[in-house]
Image: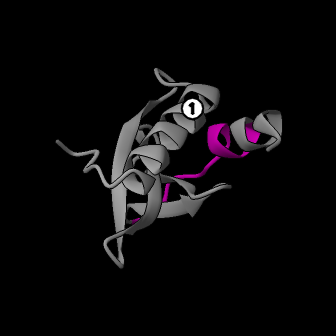
Amino acid sequence: MDFRALDRTLRTAKPKSIAYDLALDGGLSARIAANGKVKTLYWRGKMGGRVTRFKLGNYPAMTLQKAAAKALEIRSAIRNGEDPNL
């Protein structure tokens, strides 16, 4: 995963008329608010056969490296039969 390129992509994400999702890599995605300033990082994956999103944190307070590490923890918990939301 090229964190520098992903960071550049996220930093330069333009505002739109409504909030939108931006797929990054490895299940990571970002929700860009309509004003373009609020950027929330998520990990999308399957839990119990259903696709779910887990909020990781707000960018840039949470770096992409930390978000990827947290996503690995969530993925590991799911594989071990745990619910990361609890």
Q: Quadrant of residue 2?
A: top right
10 Å neighbourhood of mark 1: few (<14), some, or many (≥20)?
A: few
Magenta stretch containing residue 83, yes or no?
A: no
Seen from the viewer's position, the closer of residues 60 and 56 is 56
The secondary structure that most of the magenta stretch takes on is loop
Q: Nearer the viewer, residue 47 or 51?
A: 47
In the rendered image, residue 36, in percent from the top left (x then y), is placed at 47, 46
Q: Which residues are magenta?
A: 8-17
Q: Is residue 17 above or below residue 6?
A: below
Using residue 16 as the reference point, say whether residue 82 is left or right of it.
left
The furthest residue to the left: 86
Task: Identify the amino acid type marked 1.
Answer: Ala
Instruction: Provide residue 32's location: percent of width, then percent of height.
Output: 45, 51
Q: Confirm whether residue 60 shows in the render.
A: yes
- Residue 41, placed above or below residue 64: below
Q: Hey, which quadrant is residue 65 in on the image?
A: top right
Residue in view at x 48 percent, y 63 percent: 21
Give coordinates of residue 86: x percent, y percent: 16, 41
Give the labeled residue for mark 1. Answer: 69
Above-or-below relation of 17 to 76: below
- Residue at position x 46%, y 64% from top? 45
Q: Secondary structure at mark 1?
A: helix
Tell me what residue is drawn at x 57 percent, y 32 percent.
69
Q: How many numbered badges does the structure rendering display?
A: 1
The quarter of the picture where residue 66 lies is top right
For the N terminus, the quadrant is top right
Residue 34 visible in this rendered orientation of the protein: no
- The front one of 54 and 11 is 54
